[in-house]
Image (cartoon, rainbow, N blue to C red):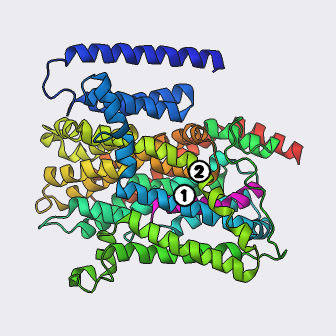
Amino acid sequence: MTKKSTRTAYVVALIAIVVLLAVLGTMYKDVETGFTGTCWALLPPVVAIALALISKEVYSSLFMGCLVGALLYTQFSPWDAIVQLVGGDYGIVTTVADSYNMGIIAFLVMLGIIVDLMNKGGGSEAFGRWAKGSVKTRCGAQLMTMLLGCLIFIDDYFNCLTVGAVMRPVTESHKISRAKLAYVIDATAAPVCMIAPVSSWAAAVSGYVQSDNVNGIEMFIKQIPYNYYCLLTLLMIVTISVLNIDYGPMLKHEYNAQVKGDLFTTPERPFAGDDEYEKPANGKSSVADLLLPVIVLIVVCIIGLIYSGGYFDPEAGDAYHSVVEAFSNADAATGLSIGALIGLVFTFVYFWVRRSISFEKSFESVPNGFIQMVSPILILSFAWTLCAFTRYGLDSESFVVGALAGMESLKKFLPAVIFIIGAFIGFATGTSWGTIGIMAPIVVSVFNYDVEPTLCVIGLAAACAGGVCGDHCSPISDTTIMASAGAHCYHLNHVFTQLPYAMTVAAVSFVSFIIAGLLQNVVICLIIACALMIGTLLVIRAITQKQHAEMLNEIKAVK
């Protein structure tokens, strides 16, 4: 699409939105509850996503979504809408000032400083040098990225940024596009966290379904083998890496990376020049200069999470003196911030002792690390505000509860329905946690665990899988934003290239949930789901074989 046609489409979309809002304002003018609990509660994120897809510009699109949310919340009172948008109950200032969100921002800034320190201290350069000699193939580089993502299962934010920092030099040496790196990072962030019993995600989900009759952690563990979207996403990464399968917009990005040496494809090149890794002041660097700070960071983040869950509190009850229970009660923002602060201090001291970087130069990383995180922090701030208006201000949960009412007669097919609804909400709101928070209590109430334990577990897995799927596809998702930042990939490039891959897994998962509802056998259903996933990818490979052959011939000619 040309710039002129893009502008035209954007203007037409804005006019359509204004007309729709005018009609809604007239229809709901005298309705006391306004738009709360109606299908229009999902209009703000739909507007943001539609404008982002048309304009390929995320900041203004998210802002417009927030503005629409404020207008609906105030029932089209212009002054009240401005007040609410800026500093009202769910406005930008109020949302960003939330202690949890501020903790995440502090964590991101400290992580950015650590990454810049590792670059200046020679860690990134040493790891890239080692990888060029040790990882011989593109397949190996992709699988190593996935493996590292699986090992960092504590939290998805931590996963995205750490894996991106470590694997950028490795994937760059094998001419893997930034879009492909962002996909692998994103696909091993939320999916891995959702099937790891000890993670901030496990803590959140177990809290949503905890009751007198059902143990939250037990329910979470039981849903893992039925969580098809997360499991099949990991299987897909292995399959496309080993068999060299690419399709959709990703094929163009991989072609440009391998034939033209262009890792970005589009003119937008986030953090351009930041991957020119520096050598340390003493001229000596080793892989330990990158791995040791990362390992320490992982360890102290785990300690920070269980500390925030009361594990070390002498006055807490015995229940809290368990790692699992501590994770279940953990505050991810507090725990990760504590871990990041300790990890940051360690990294400073480590490079000073190593004499890799001078005392004065090391503090240049403080503003540099913050600058690297400005873009994701800005996007996150708008995304959090949009989510607040949608979920709390306009009460989208009530609409979802009503949509699921009256489906008692279709219980065996309900997991598949729950998956689709969860994916839609996750896509529209950009939050899997929020989606699961809405859907999980509904699942537990629809399926009586004492009467239908297996179907209840499958339903919970469908809710979790749907939330992750929608989050994975959504351009306003915080995890998607973090994956783009970690890979130094233009955000909308990541969104457009990832969408066909995520939709492929979603389609197979939907069929798998239908089968699971009918058979209710964990082993047989998982085998069928894996077979369907591999079979689907082989069919796609056969369809795109001609394009692949042409690309391979050009790559050979370049070599």
Q: Please provide percent x and percent y for residue 306.
A: 37, 76
Q: In the image, what residue occupies the spot 19% across and 19% down?
A: 28
The range drawn in magenta is: 155-174
The residue under label 1 is 160
Magenta highlight on residue 199: no
Under circle 2, the secondary element is helix
Vertical side of 337 occupied by 253: above or below: above
Vertical side of 238 occupied by 347: above or below: below
Instruction: Look at the image and tell me whether residue 245 can be seen.
Output: no
The residue under label 2 is 485
Under circle 1, the secondary element is helix
Please state which of the two labelled residues, at mark 1 or mark 2, is closer to the viewer: 2
Q: Please provide percent x and percent y for residue 68.
A: 36, 27
Q: In the image, what residue occupies the spot 21% across and 15% down?
A: 27
Q: Badge 1, how many Cα within 10 Å: few under 14, some, many 20+? A: many
Badge 1 vs badge 2, beta-carbon distance below 8 Å: yes
Q: Three-letter amino acid code at disc 2?
A: Ala
**Quarter that holds the N terminus:** top right
